[in-house]
């Protein structure tokens, strides 16, 4: 069992000292998977964990609890991401680990899925999917990943080392009916991350992706119960915890994954394999 960090608590799978003396940045760190990753990095010895989120109240709550630093960012804003990474490297002297967990779904599409299920009618999301909703999902999930990858690799290249983990989704493979924009955005995350991985490794920077199935987070809590039940029934294990995903992400970011480059790690409770 790893050493406890104030506000973190015990976790049987923590690896003491795995990230000793490293500086980390976690986007989407104010809640869900990102918050679980930030807590685990702190518990495993990170010298500084920078918790970045669009919701500063959430970021500060997580950061204060585990002795990290809260920072504001909208990952859809390229200039804001560049400023975030520059600020971290300026304040901390370096950047060793970046976990990009920020992302959005579409509650309106989920409501339409529920409506169709209750009425016994075919799902009809696409015809009502406006440009604004499409762009919101793509700008945060895909554009945001590009912004973070670009800034992270720029910051890590001069030192010749670093690890970046992006968060995709099993929905990129096992696409959910009525969720085309989300599936497309996450498929883009996978392809983008793998392409960058092949380029960045020449400079000593490892890039990998985790592809969760359903995870029990605040985002999942917005899923209507009937839709959630159907998603949960599709896997052997059901909904994962945010800590389950943090374990997978921290492995990819750790020295133990030194030979893992451009992987898309399925962490979906046995929903399917590829």
Image (cartoon, rainbow, N blue to C red):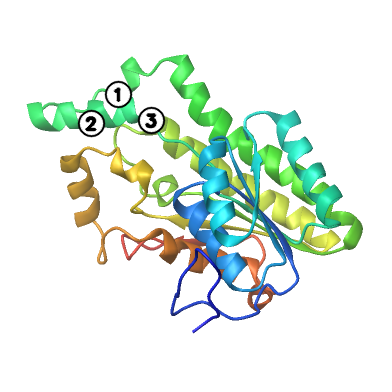
Image position of 27 (left or right of 103):
right
Image position of 73 (left or right of 214):
right
| Residue marked by disc 2 | 113
Q: Is residue 120 visible?
A: no
Q: Which residue is drawn at the image coordinates 43% and 39% (left, top)?
A: 183
Q: Which residue is drawn at the image coordinates 62% and 32% (left, top)?
A: 74
Residue at disc 3, secondary structure: loop
In the image, which is nearer the foreground, mark 3 or mark 2?
A: 3
Neighbour tally class for label 2: few under 14, some 14-19, many 20 plus, Cα within 10 Å: many
Q: Which residue is drawn at the image coordinates 67% and 28% (left, top)?
A: 77
Residue at disc 2, secondary structure: helix
In the image, which is nearer the foreground, mark 1 or mark 3?
A: 3
- Which of the 4 quarters of the picture holds residue 41? bottom right
Image quarter in which the C terminus is found: bottom left
Nearest the viewer among 174 and 47 is: 47
Residues at marks 3 and 2 touching, judged by CB atoms closer than 8 Å: no
Residue 228 is marked as: none
Nearest the viewer among 234 and 17 is: 17
Q: Earlier in the sequence, mark 1 or mark 3?
A: 3
Find residue 48 and report its horizontal and vertical position in percent. 71, 61
Find residue 67 and report its horizontal and vertical position in percent. 62, 60
Image height of 208 relative to 167, above or below? below
Residue 125 is marked as: 1
Q: Earlier in the sequence, mark 1 or mark 2?
A: 2
Residue 106 is marked as: 3
């Amino acid at each position: 069992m790893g050493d406890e960090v104030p506000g973190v608590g015990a976790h049987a799978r923590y690896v003491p000292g795995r990230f000793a003396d490293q500086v980390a940045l976690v986007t989407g760190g104010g809640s869900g998977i990102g918050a679980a990753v930030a807590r685990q990095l702190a518990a495993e010895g990170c010298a500084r964990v920078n918790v970045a989120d669009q919701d500063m109240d959430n970021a500060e709550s997580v950061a204060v609890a585990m002795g990290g630093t809260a920072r504001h960012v909208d990952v859809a804003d390229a200039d804001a991401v560049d400023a975030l990474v520059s600020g971290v490297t300026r304040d901390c002297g370096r950047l060793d680990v970046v976990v990009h967990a920020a992302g959005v779904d579409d509650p309106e599409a989920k409501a339409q899925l529920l409506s169709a299920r209750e009425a016994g009618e075919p799902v009809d999301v696409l015809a009502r999917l406006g440009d604004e909703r499409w762009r919101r999902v793509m700008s945060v999930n895909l554009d945001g990943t590009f912004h973070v990858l670009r800034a992270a690799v720029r910051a890590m290249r001069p030192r010749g080392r670093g690890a970046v983990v992006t968060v995709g989704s099993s929905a990129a493979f096992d696409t959910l009916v009525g969720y085309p924009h989300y599936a497309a955005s996450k498929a883009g995350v996978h392809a983008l991350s793998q392409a960058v991985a092949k380029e960045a490794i020449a400079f000593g920077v490892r890039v990998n992706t985790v592809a969760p199935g359903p995870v029990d987070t605040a985002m999942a809590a917005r899923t209507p119960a009937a839709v959630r039940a159907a998603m949960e029934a599709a896997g052997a294990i059901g909904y994962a915890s945010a800590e389950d995903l943090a374990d997978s992400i921290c492995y990819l970011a750790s020295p133990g994954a030194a030979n893992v480059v451009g992987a898309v790690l399925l962490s979906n409770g046995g929903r399917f394999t590829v």
